[in-house]
Image: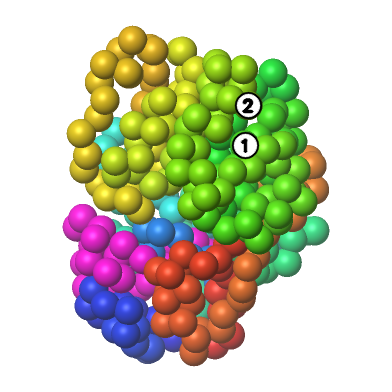
Amino acid sequence: MQSIQITAPTLDAFRRVELPEPAAPGKGRILVRMKAGSLNFADLAVASGQYPGAPYPNIALSDGVGEVIAVGEDVWQVAVGDRVAVHIKAHWIAGRPSAELANPMRGATLPGSLVEFADLDAASVVKIPDYLGWEAAGTLPIAAMTAWRTLETAQVGAASTVAVLGTGGVAIFALQLAKARGARVIVTSSSDEKLARARALGADEVVNYRKDAAWEAFVLQHTGGVGADLVIDPVGGEGINRSVAAVRHGGSVAAIGFLGGGATPLDLLQVIFKEVRVQGSNGGSVADLAGAVAAMAAHRIQPVVDRTFGLDELANAYELMAQGGHFGKIAIRFDW
């Protein structure tokens, strides 16, 4: 069978590699014909040498969906023919994890999804709804799960205000899922065109941080000086202190990425005086992915796919991710 491996921490190190086809699945395991996936910042971090502990060579890409084509003994979760999303952290089934459960990740420290057939633990997949095509469904495993878990942890509801920084994959899922909960959503971006698209998806207020650098003041202004209940921050770096400034007393800042850098001085006085919870996110469990998929299906939410790339265009897809020019998700079609 074919696979695509990343052989070095550069964007031009993708190689097609023939591997032996998996044997019939063993007890509690399934065989999945992989159909599609999508890019996340973690994939870019692996390809640029920023992901701690990533081995080279390794089968690339964390996100993946496919069709179950064989099941082993004692498999009850799925049947042959089911369409499934593959969870990125196979051993984190539910609840709060240990580091041993949370840190191993497909496409980063473990073999990823860019393979024709995957032998998987049956407990590590979630059925996907029929209304989603393969490429749309392939955007769910990391981004939709992260957005859903962040909103769930912060107990976002109809009385909540959520500030979402940027218009990437997690941000747009957070906008869609927060609106489904009845929340008020404020979106930031450097692009008026992207902000217009966010408005069309239901954003209540938008701010261009290139034109209005003090976006945290905008959030305060549009919340009567109180601040947002939750700020979803994929940027990190020095900007984390702006997120703390934008959140209400007792509110939450969800640190979900490190686009702006992984280390920065934190304004601890603000955190203490405002009793802010700064919550890191390292993905989620299989149960969290199931919750995200159920919420998407209940509201018939359609993932926003900016562009879809075939396997021969993989380097171009990573380059688009690196440039940050996308809105929503970058999908990968597994056209072997």
Q: Amino acid at mark 1?
A: Ile
The answer to whether residue 300 is left or right of residue 33 is right
Q: Which mark is residue 222?
A: 2
Residue 261 screen position, x and y as percent: 27, 50
Can residue 64 be found in the magenta stretch?
yes
Give the quadrant of residue 243.
top left
The answer to whether residue 224 is left or right of residue 46 is right
Circle 2 packing at 10 Å, graded few (<14), some (14-19), many (20+), is some
Residue drawn at 39 percent across, 33 percent down: 242
The answer to whether residue 16 is left or right of residue 7 is right
* C-alpha distance separating marks 1 and 2: 9 Å
Q: Which residue is mark 1?
A: 186
Can residue 214 be found in the magenta stretch?
no
**3 w.r.t. 166: above or below:** below
Disc 2, SS: loop
The first of marks 1 and 2 along the sequence is: 1
- Residue located farthest toward the front when viewing the structure as drawn: 211
* Badge nearest the viewer, 1 or 2: 2
Disc 1, SS: strand
Q: Are marks 1 and 2 in contact (CB under 8 Å)?
A: yes
Circle 1 packing at 10 Å, graded few (<14), some (14-19), many (20+), is many
Q: Which residues are magenta?
A: 44-71
> Which quadrant does the C terminus fall into?
bottom right
Pick whichever, 69 or 177, lies toward us. Answer: 177
Give the quadrant of residue 79.
bottom right
Q: Amino acid at mark 2?
A: His
> Which quadrant does the N terminus fall into?
bottom left
